[in-house]
Amino acid sequence: MLRKLYSEEHRDSSIAAFFRKNEKSLNRERLGEFFARNNSESQNVLLKFLELLNLNSLEVDDALREVFYHFSVSESQQIFRIIEVFSKVYSTPKLSNPDDLFAFAYFILMLQTELHSPAIEKRMSLEDMLGRVNSFNPTLAIDKEYLSQIYYNIKTKPFSKS
């Protein structure tokens, strides 16, 4: 049993390291599709891949920007699964509860879409964002100064597709 667990974890780490080492030659959409599959192997490899990125030294918006620099997903269920794993790997004193981190990370991706999608005509204002954060997750306790910083970071520096 212990040997099986070790070999599965070693396999997941090896696959993640291969993806990280060869990501420039891999298709970002295909890599995202693999990571977003609804199975434990893909989720475990994603977890190991995210651990290789050393995200905890970054603010949450920059950590998400870093994640989505390496691969691409477009469907909401795929994004949901990626954020679910992200919230297990990333930690910050500002969001110590993984459920709050998950909700806020998902909200940040919604904000990114609202601020930068050509399909959205009316852009979310800072005031809109502050109101929506509370309605999105009423238990989320993040100070307005930090929320404002996140808003302006995303407004001035969109997540890159390159």
Image (cartoon, rainbow, N blue to C red):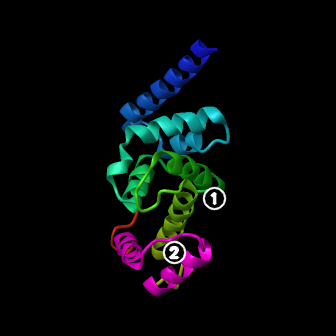
The disc placed on residue 107 is: none
Amino acid type assigned to the residue bearing label 1 in the image = Ser
138 within the magenta span: yes
Residues at circles 1 and 2 in contact by the CB criterion of under 8 Å: no
137 lies left or right of 157? right
Q: Residue at x 51, y 75 (%)?
A: 114
Q: Which residues are magenta?
A: 126-154
The answer to whether residue 158 is above or below residue 130 is above
Mark 1 / mark 2, whichever is N-terminal? 1
Residue 78, percent from left and from top: 61, 51
The residue depicted at 35 percent of the width and 73 percent of the height is 149
Q: Quadrant of the N terminus?
A: top right
- Give the labeled residue for mark 1: 76
Q: Is residue 7 above or below residue 129?
A: above
Residue 8 lies, with reference to residue 97, above or below; the image says above
Q: Quadrant of residue 137?
A: bottom right
Picture coordinates of residue 145 (x, y %)? 36, 77
Classed neighbour count for the residue bearing mark 1: other residues with Cα under 10 Å, few (<14), some (14–19), many (≥20): few
Residue 152 % position (x, y) = 35, 75
Which label is found at residue 114? 2
